[in-house]
Amino acid sequence: MIIFDHARDLIKRGLAYVDNTDVKTMRLQRRDRIESACRTFTPEQNLELFDKLLKGEADEYCLRAKIDMNSNNGCMRDPVLGRTNRTPHQRTGKKYTFYPTYDFACPIVDHLEGITHAMRTN
């Protein structure tokens, strides 16, 4: 799948990592600008964990972008790019257990579809 290939590319380039920090701790770390312990995993370790994540063998992990934990903009502090969801999908059933976030998937899909100006709103 193309989105998973982009995720792998980011991991190989050291721009994303797989993280098992619980939601509450992650929220506090992002607020306090503290890096996750998983941020230092090598690309090889992250790729291995990512493959397990895609197979449904590592539910406790999510994929995060490695941006800047010291940014004044909280959205830039290593946002989540995708997470596990075991709930069967209405069309694909249990085929996928890992789902990319809107902010990660939309730019990729827009590029593939030739969208140059996306008009989105809340």
Image (tube, rainbow, N blue to C red):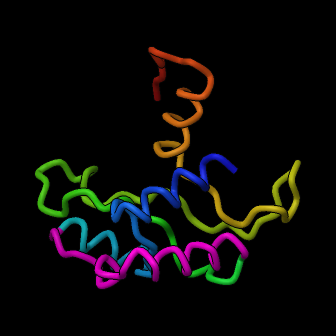
Give the percent coordinates (x, y) of residue 76.
Answer: 25, 51
Question: In the rendering, at what x and y percent does residue 8 appear?
Answer: 52, 61
Main secondary structure of the magenta stretch? helix
Q: Is residue 42 above or below residue 11?
A: below
Residue at the image point whose x is 86% and y is 53% from the top: 92
Residue numbers of the magenta segment: 32-55
Q: Residue at x 60, y 28 (%)?
A: 112
Relative to residue 27, is residue 54 drawn left or right? Answer: right
Quarter of the view holding residue 58: bottom right
Q: Position of residue 111 (x, y in %)?
A: 53, 27
Q: Is residue 89 above or below residue 83?
A: above
Residue 101 screen position, x and y as percent: 53, 50
Task: State left or right for residue 89 relative to residue 111.
Answer: right
Say if 11 sits above or below 6 in the image: below
| Residue 28 quadrant | bottom left
Decide: is 75 above or below 42: above
Q: Residue at x 24, y 74 (%)?
A: 29
Q: Name the residue rendered at 55%, 80% in the picture.
A: 49
52 in magenta = yes
In this image, 86 relative to 44: left or right? right
Which quadrant of the view contains residue 32? bottom left
